[in-house]
Amino acid sequence: MVRRVSTPKKTVNAANLLVLGADRLSALLFEAASIDPALKRRLRMELAAEISAADLALEIDKRLNTLATSRARVSWRKRPALLNDLQSLRRVIVDRLALLDARLALDRLVGWFDLYPTLGARVSDAKGELPLLFDAATSDLGAVASAAGLDNAAPVLGEALSTRLNPWASWVGRGAQSLSPELAQRLLIDLTTGRPKPTGRLALVVRKLADRSGDLDAWIQSIAEDDGRKPEIGAEIARRLAEADRPAEARDALEAARQVNPPARPGRGKPEQAHVPDAWLDAEIAVLEAEGRGEEADAARWRVFERTLSADQLRTLIAKLADFEDVVALDRAFALAADHPDAMKGLAFLMGWPALREAADLVVRRQAELRGGHDDLPLWAGRLAGRFPLAALLLVRARARALVALGAGITEEVEGLIAEAEALGAVLDQDEAGGDHAAFVTELRALAAPRPRRW
């Protein structure tokens, strides 16, 4: 029997279903709802929404109450249906009720989030899908709360944080960027005014709200004094103060977080050097700029670049230079990368800039330091093959040696690398290629050969 090809008109989508007409569609929905309780509930909510926000809120409350009071265990087989039910209920609150009455929607959405503790105790959820579903809804929480207005939303969210800090601290923190800055500021004031300095989870919420409202002082106050002296945290405080054009305070914060060199160990002449985190060095640059010490900031950028090979720092330096001076700066940067203690880090910078000639020179000069396990080696070899076949050949050979050394043997990937090496070597002199291709293959076969066991 010849199988008929499905036509686009038979595809079940919203546009094609319009052809059936309202009467036929309503009959089909009624038929489906008679055997699907979830669909029947959704249709009842949609009908209620056509009457009023209060009617829809009542239908939502019924479902929330059923889910909240149930004590039945939910097996892994029934979990998908429950998750779909929760998603559908959230969409009704956010997409339907919030448009009719944001205040009523916020109350129901808070009730929806409050289902989590009891559901978490009775749902078989080895994959962790339930908490992810609630975390994903935090942006809706922020949007609905903002739509509900300051006087309605602030007391509701403040009460949730005061009485149910765990897990509401996480939800409000995650949804903070969806709050209006005005609501974030109002919550911030309510959580901090006349109260002890926030700690723990509450401090994290305060920090997120301060970020959203742009209240730098509240953000700093949420950090414990001892934590502020840690290099990474103190550097972040200093950077923010510098960007807010408060250089004196930024300098104080930076210096408070400066690590002191540890004392010399017995028997050693020189004291050990304290490790300075990259974040602290970046903050130092921001503070120097805020203090108007541009030349010192640029010198610090070069120190950071020499250590990290940060392309962003180099671009900032070059952007300030006049014509020809930028060429000199680039030459200096490429030389630093070529001689970096980590050859692969230097190569990654040169390939990413891109500076292919300098990268090829590094490969040839420091071929003994190449690590064939680097994920980008095949890509780099392909980019160098046209103009710098010797460098490409060395990368391909390093990759093949690394794969064989891992114990996989002569795999299909290794065979492909062997063929690629042969093609690259064909355009080079034998001496230039560092030995003939046959010797390279023999080396790989020897690496792949099983080694006798020692007894």
Image (cartoon, grey):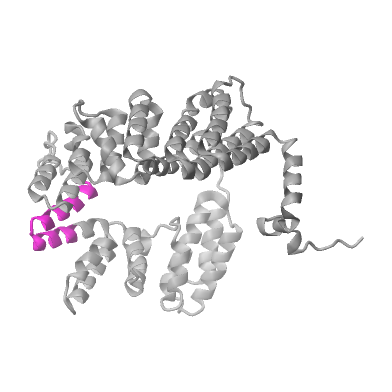
Front-most of residues 346 and 33: 33
Quadrant into which the C terminus falls: top right
In magenta segment, residue 4: no
Return the x and y of residue 252 as percentages of the image width and height: 9, 43
In magenta segment, residue 293: yes
Tell me if residue 44 comes above or below residue 388 in the rendering: above
Front-most of residues 330 and 82: 82
Horizontal side, residue 96 vs residue 146: left or right:
right
Residue appearing at x 51%, y 45% in the figure: 95
Residue 26 in sight in this render: yes
Q: Would you say the magenta stretch is mainly helix, strand or loop?
A: helix
Return the x and y of residue 428 as percentages of the image width and height: 46, 78
Return the x and y of residue 270 as percentages of the image width and height: 10, 43
**Location of residue 187 (image quadrant):** top left
Residue appearing at x 20%, y 44% in the figure: 216
Horizontal side, residue 414 vs residue 342: left or right:
right
Residue 126 in sight in this render: no
Front-most of residues 232 and 33: 33
Tell me if residue 400 comes above or below residue 424 in the rendering: above
Quadrant into which the N terminus falls: bottom right
Tell me if residue 195 comes above or below residue 210 in the rendering: above
Residue lying at the far right of the rendered structure: 1
Return the x and y of residue 42 as percentages of the image width and height: 62, 38
Write down the region rendered in magenta: 275-303
Tell me if residue 183 comes above or below residue 428 in the rendering: above
**Location of residue 336 (image quadrant):** bottom left
